Amino acid sequence: MAYSEKVIEHYENPKNVGALDKEDPTVGTGLVGAPACGDVMRLQIRVNDSGVIEDAKFKTFGCGSAIASSSLATEWIKGKHIDEAGRIQNSQIAEELNLPPVKIHCSVLAEDAIKSAIEDFRQKRAAQRALAADAPATAAK
Amino acid sequence: MALKLPIYMDNHATTRVDPRVVEAMLPFFDETFGNAASRTHAFGWHAEAAVEAARDTIAGLINAESSKEIVFTSGATESDNLAIKGVAEYYQPKGNHIVTTVIEHKAVLDSCKRLEKQGFEVTYLPVGKDGRVDPDDIRRALTDKTILVSVMLANNEVGTIQPIAEIGKVTRERGVLLHCDAVQGIGKTDFDVRAMNVDLASLTAHKIYGPKGVGALYVRRAKPRVRLVAQMDGGGHERGNRSGTLNVPGIAGFAKACEILKQEGKAENERVRRLRDRLHRGIASALDEVVLNGHAEHRLPGNLNLSFSFVEGEGLMMAIKDVAVSSGSACTSASLEPSYVLRAMGLDEELAHSSIRFGLGRFNTEEEVDFVIDLVVGKVKKLRDMSPLYEMFKDGIDLKSIQWVPH
């Protein structure tokens, strides 16, 4: 199968490969896919106080299209507010990379990874706020 | 000398035609272009003489008793179809049971599946972790309704060589016919239809540096005499077993390829085995978590099937595009199922997705092998740096303990 030039470009020069500290309260981590299915994507975001994604990193086990989809996803979400990043559709990724029908699932995985990272961040933030709400009572003792 | 890229290491898929084979074929396109079935003129006689000489050579390579036992076909898929369906149809009054293995080529498996729809019963025997079938399993699977056992000589993915001689003992003892798809193993491992009690054998030219589109089916004529029902109707060529004008240039090339194998095969296999071992050592000494698929010893000299844990096969092939190989990864097909052969050997799906098949052959050089070692090692390291699974493995996380969400 021939790959599109955009897939090859992202595959050969992937953007934002790496890891963020997943214990950091400003970091959200999404891990989607399964080794048995041949693709696993881990996408991480660092979000500032106003909800803007300041940094994004990924690591992916998968074919060229899966790696390209992850690379593109991290590029797209950087600088976006999490609400906006959460609205990215797999079809946009598939279109940008000219993915053939058998590779559409790679773009679905990338969309899932973004959503999952945002969800992780939101849960962390909610837990922190709950903790912060309890904090003054403790301090008053 | 500069290396010519890409390097071809997919010799189980097909092989480059040897220049000596091309040369042997050329006269049959123009000077001696006759139809081997034309009995009335010299054009036909010359063609027929070439075909008969080729039959002798091919019969000789597998130690057939007579050249009359060679039926020319369009290739191994046709040979497999003719052997299985042809035997099934002829021997149906005697029984309706066929025994084969789960790792056969699709030409065998799908022929069997079609027969099942027509009321035949087929037993698909499992193989061990090393890809070998146990002859005792064959013995146990035979019933008084069994008419045919079909087992390949060597597997196309993992190169595992099957114990055909032992299986032949079992089938001969029980009076059941044995068909062997010998395509991958011919000339690369011992194959002797008389010593091994093989009754039908599928052969093809393009895996042995001959042309595509020509193959043969060996059909035993004595002790026992094997009968077939032809699957193609027409002029009654090949003693009524396979109608259709013979591919004379192809047949001449096929014979030349067999002749070269007979003369040079032994030395060539040793050379290819050394190259293969060099490739294996070079890769395995530089990388951790590399798994050899298939049998360590009972394997084709040119075959190296490796799983690179935590790296997906198709992704790896894209990274090493300067070398032509193939992968058991699902991503290479539309089915999303990884290799049925590797799965049948009990390999984890994850490792099946991570497999690469290197098929070395006559035209590979040591220089190419060294280039491929560096290429593969470098790219696997790069992809592992990008792999969340490798990071987790290095952090001591058991990947099996994670609740994955298949999509």
Image (cartoon, coloured by chain):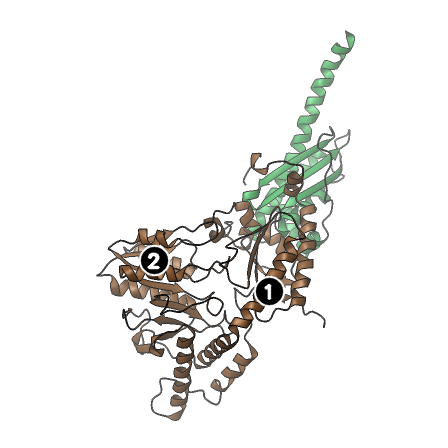
Chain colours: A green, B brown
User: In the shown orientation, is residue B148 left or right of residue A89?
Assistant: left
Badge 1 is on which residue? B274
Image vertical order of residue B359 relative to residue B133, above or below: below
| Type of the residue with mark 2 | Arg
- What's the chain of the residue with tag 2? B
| Type of the residue with mark 1 | Arg
Looking at this rendering, what residue extends furthest in the left direction?
Answer: B93
**10 Å neighbourhood of mark 2: few (<14), some, or many (≥20)?**
few
**B277 vs A37, nearest the viewer:** B277
> What element does badge 2 sit on?
helix
Q: Where is residue A57 in the image (x, y as percent from the top left)?
A: 72, 41
User: In the shown orientation, is residue A14 left or right of residue B121?
Assistant: right
> What element does badge 1 sit on?
helix
On the image, which quarter does residue B111 sit in?
bottom left
Between the C-alphas of marks 1 and 2, the distance is 42 Å
Q: In which quarter of the image is the C terminus of chain B?
A: top right
User: In the shown orientation, is residue A51 left or right of residue B239?
Assistant: right
Image vertical order of residue A111 relative to residue A130, above or below: below
Earlier-in-chain disc, 1 versus 2: 2
Does the image show residue A6?
no
Q: Quadrant of the N terminus of chain B?
A: bottom right
Badge 2 is on which residue? B114
Q: Position of residue B158 (x, y in %)?
A: 51, 57
Q: Position of residue B289 (x, y in %)?
A: 62, 47
- What's the chain of the residue with tag 1? B
**10 Å neighbourhood of mark 1: few (<14), some, or many (≥20)?**
some
Q: Where is residue B348 in the image (x, y as percent from the top left)?
A: 52, 45
